[in-house]
Image: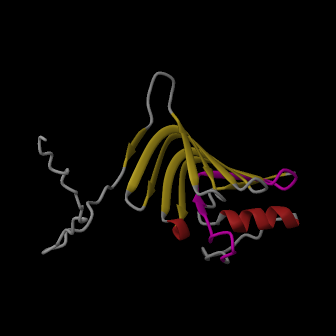
Amino acid sequence: MILLLRRIRDLSINQIVLAAIIGGFYFLPKPIQAQTYNSGGSITVRSDIQEANSETGVVTARGNVEINFPARQIQATAAQAQYFSRERRLILSGNVYVLQEGNSMRAEEMTYLIDEGRFIATPKENRQVESTYIVSDPPVTQNTEVSLPQVNIDSPASTTPQ
């Protein structure tokens, strides 16, 4: 059974999946924060339309998708997102942009493997994935002494002609 939500922008995936699994949705008058599970916290999805299939455990969000995963400092936008609750996998498609801890990535499609904390990005045909990473220099310490190892070199025995 597919349940359709129109313009409900503040339900988290955990709330939607839980409601789909027990067979119905609870429409909330105000946005609330979902409970945090050992899985790493709640993921909030906002979109124009959301569907949840209780048989497959797949939640689909379409149109102006915005994702926020505070526990992992991830923010993302896309045209569509599908959350596969059984595989703990999130697939974003259509002009995907992901920002995590200041690092960013753009692609046509990205898969986020939640348990591995890993993104897999694929570009449009004849295009490339674009990533920007923050690279910090190691801290510079002042008055650093460098100790060189001591090496003993025996001088060759003197040779005296006899």
In the image, 42: left or right of 66?
right
Q: Residue at x 59, y 57 (%)?
A: 117
Q: Residue 30: x percent and y percent? A: 61, 76
The answer to whether residue 141 is left or right of residue 117 is left
Closer-to-camera residue (107/79): 107
State which quadrant residue 19 falls in. bottom right
Quadrant in the picture for the C terminus: top left
Q: Main secondary structure of the magenta part?
A: loop
**Number of numbered discs:** 0
- Residue 151: x and y in percent read 24, 61
**Which of 56 and 143 lies nearest the eye of the viewer?**
143
Q: Nearer the viewer, residue 114 or 32?
A: 114
The location of residue 42, given as percent across then percent down, is 63, 69
The image quarter containing residue 130 is: top left
**Magenta-span inclusion, residue 97:** no
Answer whether residue 45 is magenta in the image: yes
Instruction: Give, as a single range, the part of the protein colored magenta.
Output: 36-57
**Vertically, is 67 above or below 37?**
above
Residue plotted at (19% across, 51% down): 157
**Can residue 135 be seen at all in this image of the molecule?**
yes
Position of 86 compared to 70: left or right? right
What residue is at 67 percent from the left and 62 percent from the top? 13
Q: Quick check: 153 left or right of 19? A: left
Say which residue appears at 63% left-offset and 61% top-offset: 8
Residue 27 on image: x %, y %:
72, 69
Q: Residue furthest front?
A: 162
